[in-house]
Amino acid sequence: MMIFLINLPPPLHGMSYINSKLLQRAKDKGLDINIVNTTPSDKSKISLVSKVLKHGFIFFDFFKVLIKHSGNNKLYRPINGGKGQLIDIAYLVLSKLFKYDVYIHHHSYNYLNIKSKLFSIICFILSGKAKHIVLSADMKEKLSELYNIDSKDIMVLSNIGFIDVDNSQNYKENILKENIVISYMANVTLEKGIDIFIKTCQMIDNSNPNKYEFRIAGPIIDSNTRKLVDAFTSEFKNAYYVGPVYGEQKEEFLNASDIFYFPSKYKNEAEPLVLYEAASCGCLVIGSQVGSMRDAIAHISGESFPLTIHSDEEAIDNFVRDVCNFICALDNNELYIRKRKSKQKFSDNRFANMDKIDNLLDCLKN
């Protein structure tokens, strides 16, 4: 028997999406699972008091499950980044008291960009006897070096195997007769690189007037970012902000795109699912090398350029110039070939990682 101690949607975000997908795969394989949902609320933001009370009830439910199923069992826990690891510490202390074999799934670079005291405490609690699941070879290397975790206890499992696909075709394949569409889709923030996206698009359009269209999708929260986007779409008539897109609208947005450009410099960026979603829709993906993005983009035959959370203004300018030169040097036929290759590589690596998911579930089962 195993316990899935996981955050399930709502709210829906990268980690809760992966949790729900892995849980469904485990159920499909007939695994004996006890689920403890550690999501404190279906709302994105709740008060600290409400969160503490909710976690208290969840902790009590978890305790009851541990008592009922004490013995040689396994626990799967995707851990938080930052202060959320205080909650993880409480759960993991209890699980070790009941002698559970623990599998930790890592989804954040918060404690990998710089050594964390909280995660060091988690490592002490686990006493080197846990198994770790990471998103990339880079993540594995950082985890092993920073926290002295034996590499044989670390399994690399990309999120690409969890991405749903349909049979829709990218209807922008005939790019010989249409403008090339360069798209951005995320929470529209400076951390997620919207300023770099705009700066690059301006440089591209100055070199090749009206050859490209620039499309931005996603929620905008702060007024300064709104002003930046509004100024861009006002100055460039081939630039558009379409707002947040979900479900079918998101697929339509990506299917209408040729190049998906994501120059994120977000400090906790790990392996954004949107990179794989874009590739599944036949986009050539271009991005930064923050977190596991370099490995992720390589999985889908895209192009990543040197840009990290530590990049200064000179490095950012070099990044913008390199991306601009790369895009402008692509002729339409070559772009068409790259788009098809991206979709094929996505499919190949997706199936390979689906096998790895099954291997993980077999480890949890045995």
Image (cartoon, helix red, strand yellow):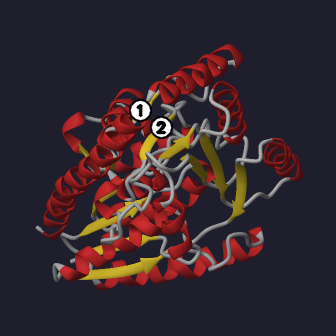
Image x and y of residue 313, in percent: 71, 18
Image x and y of residue 219, in percent: 71, 61
Q: Give the residue at the far front of this rendering.
A: 177
Q: Residue at x 49, y 71 (%)?
A: 7
Q: Residues within 10 Å of mark 2 (few under 14, many from 20)?
A: many
Q: With 39 as the anchor, is 172 left or right in this view?
A: left
Q: Amino acid at mark 1?
A: Glu
User: Is the N terminus in the top left, top right, bottom left or bottom right quadrant?
Assistant: bottom left
Q: Give the residue at the far top of this rendering.
A: 314
| Location of residue 289 with respect to 188 vertically, above or below | above
Q: Residues within 10 Å of mark 1 (few under 14, many from 20)?
A: some
Q: Nearer the viewer, residue 261 or 357?
A: 261
Q: Residue at x 61, y 35 (%)?
A: 265
Q: Nearer the viewer, residue 185 or 272?
A: 185
Q: Secondary structure at mark 2?
A: strand
| Location of residue 288 with respect to 261 vertically, above or below | above
Q: Are marks 1 and 2 in contact (CB under 8 Å)?
A: yes
Write down the residue under mark 1. 303
Q: Amino acid at mark 2?
A: Ile
Q: Nearer the viewer, residue 220 or 18?
A: 220
Image x and y of residue 139, in percent: 38, 37
Nearer the N terminus, badge 1 or badge 2? 2
Q: Secondary structure at mark 1?
A: strand
Q: With 241 as the anchor, is 102 left or right in this view?
A: left
Instruction: Say how many tags the image has.
Output: 2
Visible residue check, residue 326: yes
Q: CA distance from mark 1 to mark 2?
A: 5 Å
